[in-house]
Image (cartoon, rainbow, N blue to C red):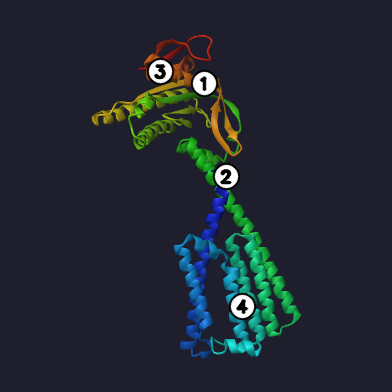
Amino acid sequence: MNLEDDLNRALHDAQLHNARLINRMRAAGLTCFLLTLFLMSVALGHGDWHPGWLEYTYVALAFFLLLAGELNLRALRISRFAIPVFDMPMVFVIQLKNLVTTGSAGDSFAALFSQTSFSLKASAGQVAEFSVALFICLILLSAFTLSASQVFLSLGVASVLQQVLHWQAGVTVGSHLNSLIVFGLATWICVFAGKNRRGLIEAITRADARRGRLRRYFSPSVADLLEQRADETLGEGREVELTVLFADLREFTRMSETMDSPEVVRLLNECHAFLVEAVFRNGGTLDKYLGDGLMAYFNAPLPCEDHAERALRCALEMREALHSLNEAREAEGKPALRLGIGIHSGPCVVGDIGAPHRREFTAIGQTVNLASRIEAATKEAGVGILFSAATGKLVEDTNECFEVGSFEIRGCSLPLTLYSVT
């Protein structure tokens, strides 16, 4: 999956998270609203604050949206559109009812809403202007959807409904225009905030993708250091002296023919686990998995003067770990595994290589090819670890090396002398 897919998925996840948050905020806010009405009507004796069927319906539907969104992902997606198609119409109907109680609406509205809900002792203008504040809150809340289209839809719905309320209240033309200006300002704030929020999500997603890429190739300590340095030139091609290591399980293909598929996968995962652990423990970079083997290198992206020593130490640790695994396998009556490791030091080109949508940080060059062919020569030599003279010169002061012999290596005009370590 490429970065664009990751960004879309992160935005979608954020939208669903915010939709769940909006549902909870709606239910909590309306619960407080009902409690306030009960407090005013029962505790304080203001009977005209008693809630009616409209308020109960609004609260019941709000909790239905909350429950449906918590239990069903599809319902949660649909609830993202609740502000313009549910909240705003409900606020409009309740406020229109409040206009009826002031005597500012026609008889047909009075017949519909009479004795159905609480009556605010306020002028028609005050009711209409309070609805402006309610619609602004809902427009601002729509910013949480992270969708500019929903913000503009909320603007359109709020503008139409508010003009109807102003018309019913009989307010001046200036109030009509003022509400549109305030709604437009709130919408601009929401779009601006939503754009910044989307930019933040994109930045976090890119950072997570980069962090995941670093931890895929490098040891945790190296990955943390690279992340702290924020080295954006990591993927640029450059030539560097590397020690390249190839490791491969001998005759694993033939052995796997007698094993079922799950067992093959389990065994490969177990082997790759200790191979990669040895690479990372010695500060190496995992280049790629090669079926039942792998390629790794040392001295990039962070330099280390003892890269050949690290590679050889990694090979010895791989051999020791395989020995422990074979002891356990032999105790279970299973055949032992054999490992061939080839090492060569020389110049390589490292960087991000591949198609635009599928790049990998890798090393290429003749040094890589020779290391792979030296690993293949371990079959002929009957030795588990082989390395070139170039590597031998870098490790001879700290290791007891011995010459294994000269081998015909494809790509070399002359036989290549190879070495191993006691």
**Quarter occupied by residue 117:** bottom right
Relative vertical location of residue 132 with respect to residue 259 in this rendering, above or below: below
Q: Which residue is mark 3?
A: 378
* Closest to the observer, 251 or 117: 251
Q: Is residue 395 left or right of residue 361?
A: left
Mark earlier in primary sequence (1, 2)? 2
Residue 254 appears at what percent x and percent y? 36, 25
| Looking at the image, residue 40 lies above or below residue 383 | below
Q: Is residue 320 above or below residue 131?
A: above
State how far apart marks 1 and 2 are (Cα).
Answer: 31 Å
Residue 143 position, x and y percent, is 60, 63
Q: Indicate the quadrant containing the C terminus: top left, top right, bottom left or bottom right.
A: top left
The answer to which image quadrant residue 292 occupies is top left
Name which residue lies at 55% across and 40% down: 229
Which residue was labeled with disc 1? 369
Whether residue 397 is visible to the viewer of this picture, yes or no, is no
User: Which residue type does callout 2 highlight?
Assistant: Leu
* SS at badge 3: helix
Which mark is drawn over residue 92?
4
Residue 3 numbered mark, or none: 2
